[in-house]
Amino acid sequence: MNSVGIRELKANLSSYVAKVRNGEQIIITDHGQEAGIIIPISEERKLIISLMKAGKAQWSRNKPKGIKGVKAKGKALSDTILEARE
């Protein structure tokens, strides 16, 4: 994984974007300290974006609140997972 300072990133942004498009991850540093990371868009995210552009999905940019009025039968998923770990 490559790392790059902010000044270098700003000066050569296009070349770093090309690296990310090719699957690389880039760590951004600020005065030698890791500040962030640039990663490629996942295939799942690309699918979601294409569905949104086609008008088949929406996202209000808020955290999902769940679906009201839907009840699941059986044990809670967390209980099933805990049992499987034993």
Image: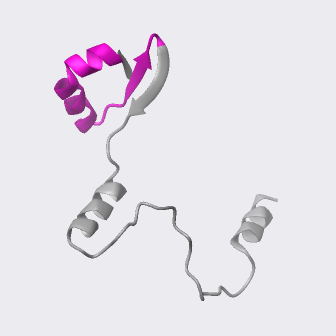
| Vertical side of 82 occupied by 22: above or below | above
Q: How many labels, in total? A: 0
Q: Residue furthest right?
A: 86
Above or below 80: residue 31: above
Residue at 79% x, 66% y is: 83
Question: For the point 74% across and 70% down, which residue is it?
Answer: 80
Query: What residue sits 41% from the left and 24% below the top?
Result: 27
The image quarter containing residue 81 is bottom right
- Toward the top, the furthest residue is 31
- The quarter in which the C terminus is drawn is bottom right
Quarter of the rendering occupied by the N terminus? top left
> Is 82 within the magenta?
no
Residue at left 40%, top 66%? 60
Q: Is residue 10 magenta?
A: yes
* 57 horizontally vs 31: left or right: left
Position of 62 compared to 16: left or right? right
Residue 23: x %, y % from top left: 29, 36
Looking at the image, residue 31 lies above or below residue 77 = above
**Foreground residue among 56 and 43:** 56
Is 34 in front, or is 22?
A: 34
Range of residues picked out in magenta: 5-32
> In this figure, which colouring scheme has been used for the structure?
one colour
Residue 79: image location, x then y, percent: 77, 69
Q: Residue 11: which quarter of the image?
A: top left
Residue 66 at x, y percent in the picture: 56, 74
Task: Tell me if 67 is positioned left or right of 51 in this view.
Answer: right
